[in-house]
Amino acid sequence: MERFLTSEGISATRPSGQFRNAHERIKEWRDADPDRPAVADLFFAVKWLGNVGTHEDSDLTTMEVLDGARVLDEAFHRLFTGPDIDAQARTINAAKGPSRQP
């Protein structure tokens, strides 16, 4: 997720060179586009689980780790396939069935 944010132009560091935390970076990414809050909420959920899981005395369960993986998978699914699927559904709905080109 952090690498994704970097690829989206969300800097991992401040001008001073100090690293920025994931929460701050997710907020910046979310606020840059009004269509992003739903996916940002998924990123925040993954971040919270990751915060718990990084501590030596973490009691994060295997199922909770898998939940985080599912949430992250859904976030990327929405980002990279969602708009195409939505556009395809609009085309089908407008045609009231398959939209076939002659």
Image (cartoon, rainbow, N blue to C red):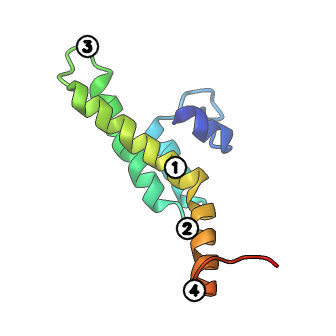
Q: x and y percent of residue 89 in the render?
A: 57, 73
**How many C-alpha atoms fall within 10 Å of the one at disc 2: few (<14), some, or many (≥20)?**
few
Mark 1 or mark 3: which is in front? 1
Mark identifier at residue 96: 4
How far from the left and from the top, in percent, is residue 95? 63, 85
Q: Residue furthest top?
A: 56
Image coords of residue 79 (percent x, y): 56, 53
List the residue tagged with mark 3: 56
Q: What number is the disc on residue 17?
A: none
Give the Cα distance between marks 1 and 4: 26 Å
Q: Residues within 10 Å of mark 4 (few under 14, many from 20)?
A: few
Determine whether the residue tagged by mark 4 lies in a helix, strand or loop: loop
Q: Decide which of tag 4 and tag 3 comes sooner along the chain.
A: 3
Label annotation for residue 34: 2
| Position above or below: 35 against 77 | below
The residue depicted at 55 percent of the width and 59 percent of the height is 82
Pick whichever of labels 1 and 2 is earlier in the sequence: 2
